[in-house]
Image: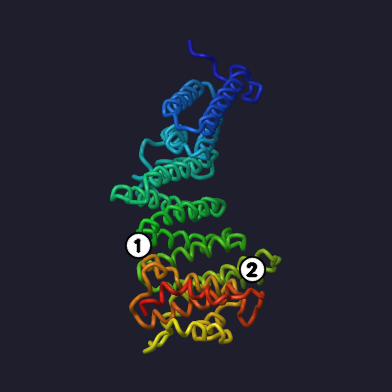
Amino acid sequence: MDPPPASFYGKVEKKNPVVLAFTADIKEFKSYVKRLKESSYTNHNAYARGAKKVFEIWNKYKPRLPPHYFSQNLLQTADFLYNNKLHKLALWQGYGRHLQELCTSNIENVKDVDHLKSSFFPDGFDTEQANLTFRALQGQILCSYYLEKEKGEQLSRDRLQKLLRLLGFLRILMQAVLPHERLFWILYNGSLHIYNICRFLMSSKQSAQALEFLLWASVCLEVSIPLLNAHFVTWRATLYCAVCQCYYEEHHSAEVFARRALKKMSDLETLERMSGSEVTVESQLAYKEASVKLTAMVFKRSVFETRRTYKCLLKSEQIEEIQNVPWPRNSTEHLLMEMFQGDAAQFLAMMEALWDTTRRPLQVGLPKEPDIQEVMLELLFAGVRLLSGRTSHTNYGIPTENIFFSVCLNCILHDI
């Protein structure tokens, strides 16, 4: 004879004996997991016993508890496992188990919005079940991503295709909720997940694959009215900069997109002021930070493209003379001052202009093109001067020793 359900004892609340037993078993399982995580060595048998334990808990209590209550606790336990980096267990005995109750189809096989709705949201997005499903879908994506990431940065073709399918599903999910303003949090979370997965792709030299998804995430933030709030400005700027990095790593010009992003930010700030809403110090700082980051993306290419080619370059014997020339000393430093206010912003722009995943000047020397060499040397000199605090608009009194220049630039200048 099967044990009676929780409803047999009255209301499904904390004092219900079935709920008490269920809560106690879950608490014991979580304590077991915490002890495993605190252990100094990995015991695979102990992890297997934990997986068996939670499997038995679900099978024991699923017939005895109301479906919604059971699903809530199932996903809470999955979140606990995810936070403890037990991604496989969270996937199999948490998010995946919940989704299997709705549809046996894998999320990677979902082709479009209609397929998504018919598979996971047959009753629409306005039910309590839909909120749990959104939570489970995001958990499924994150666990699948981290399981792939744990295998290393060298992506095989199969692993790359799996990550692209996860990104494709995220795009479909965001497309489905785009017309529903109250579900803006799905768009926001989706943009976070897309960014994290795409950053991993970029670190694995797959920027071309990441670009279209980062563009999609950026556009979603632009068209969602709740996400036009100043609170999300910093995050929008981060996405915009990631798109620019993809363009640059693929040797394409990103200035057009960066200028477009700057215009969007300016329009958003103007709209906020026209709306009559209070302009806080935090929002002003957010807009300023976004402007600096995006302007740095414009400077990254402009500083090289606006340079005329010179026949002679800086030599090591000129370093002493350069140190004594007042700031700004050359066209690169003039451009820094024109585009950025303050040492911090100028130093960020200098670092961004020098950053190139395909070139490591401090290890292998400067590129062969004379004009590029000239600009990179001027950027390095500007960086040292900015660190010293000896620019025209600020003076922190930090001396710049001659030996500091020699050590920093010797490895670059010796072949010039």
Name, please, the residue furthest toward the left.
Answer: 157
Q: Of marks 1 and 2, which one's residue comes earlier in the chain?
A: 1
Where is 15 relative to 366, above or below? Answer: above
Residue drawn where x is 35% and y is 59% of the image = 205
Nearer to us in this view, 218 or 240: 240
In the figure, 20 relative to 242: above or below?
A: above
Residue 158 appears at what percent x and percent y? 29, 47
Of 53 and 109, nearer the camera is 53
Residue 191: image tag: none
* Closer to us: 201 or 261: 201
Q: Quote the CA–CA distance across marks 1 and 2.
A: 35 Å
Q: At 36% across and 89% down in the image, what residue appears?
A: 311
Identify which amino acid the numbered label 1 is placed on.
Ala
Instruction: Indicate whether 4 appears above or below 167.
Output: above
Q: Is the image coloured rainbow, by chain, by secondary structure, or in one colour?
A: rainbow
Which is in the foreground here, disc 1 or disc 2? 1
Q: Is residue 352 above or below residue 328?
A: above
Q: Which corner quadrant of the image does residue 338 belong to?
A: bottom right
Residue at the outermost front position: 403
* Residue 295 visible at all: no
Q: Quadrant of residue 106?
A: top left
Residue identified by numbered label 1: 208
Residue density around tag 1, few if under 14, some if 14–19, many if 20 or more, within 10 Å = some
Secondary structure at badge 1 equals helix
Q: Which amino acid does the dot numbered 2 rest on? A: Glu
Q: How far across and how far down the image is residue 78, in percent?
A: 50, 35
Residue at point 48%, 77% (across, down): 379
Q: Which residue is mark 2?
A: 272
